[in-house]
Image: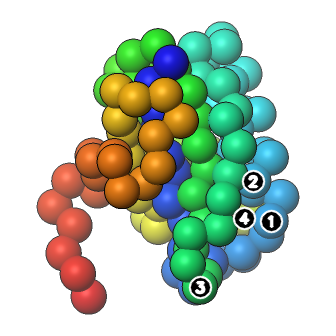
Amino acid sequence: MQTIIVKLDAEKMENPDLDILTLLPARAEEVSGGLLTDNGYDYLSGSELGIWLAADQARDAAEMLLQLLQAEQFAGNDLSKTAEIYISEQDSAPLEDCRMIYPEDKTEE
C-alpha cells in the first residue's frame, strides 16, 4: 500500500477538534468505498499533526481525498483551506519521505 498524509495545523483551523483524527479517515474510507484506509496519526511538531491513509494508488486516491475536503467540513473546519496533502509510493512512509501535492503552489509565510 502507498501512503497519503493529511498534515493539519491546529493554529490554522477554526475548530481544532481532535475528533478530526477519526472523523476524516472514517469518512474518506466510506466515500472511497474502501480505496482509502485509515493508517493512524502522529503529532508532527508543535501544533501540527498528520493523518496517515493507505491506498493502492496514492496519487489517484489523493485526488479523491481532495474532492472530499473541498465538499465537506470536518468538526466545523474547511480543511481544503488549511490542510496539506503528501504522498509516497512507500508503505507507511514518514512525512520526510513524501512529496507535497496540495496545495500545489505553497509558499512559506
Q: Tell me, for residue 46, which label it has, or none.
A: 3
Residue kind at label 2, given as amino acid type: Leu
Residue for point 39% across, 16% down: 57
Give SS at disc 2: helix
Residue 68 visible somewhere in the drawing:
no
Q: Position of residue 15 (x, y in %)?
A: 72, 75
Give SS at disc 4: loop
Residue at the spot of label 1: 18
Q: Report, in whole angstroms, how far the alpha carbon at label 1 lies from the one at label 2.
A: 6 Å
Q: Position of residue 97 (x, y in %)?
A: 34, 48
Residue at the spot of label 4: 76
- Res 60 → quadrant: top left
* Comes first in the chain, label 3 or label 4: 3
Q: Tell me, for residue 21, which label it has, or none.
A: 2
Give SS at disc 3: loop
Residue for point 75% across, 56% down: 20
Q: Nearer the viewer, mark 3 or mark 4?
A: 3
Q: In terms of depth relative to the viewer, which is nearer, 4 or 20?
A: 4
Give SS at disc 1: loop
Discs 1, 2 touching: Cβ within 8 Å: yes
Q: In terms of depth relative to the viewer, which is nearer, 49 or 80?
A: 49
* Comes first in the chain, label 1 or label 3: 1
Residue for point 80% across, 46% down: 22
Q: Quadrant of the C terminus?
A: bottom left
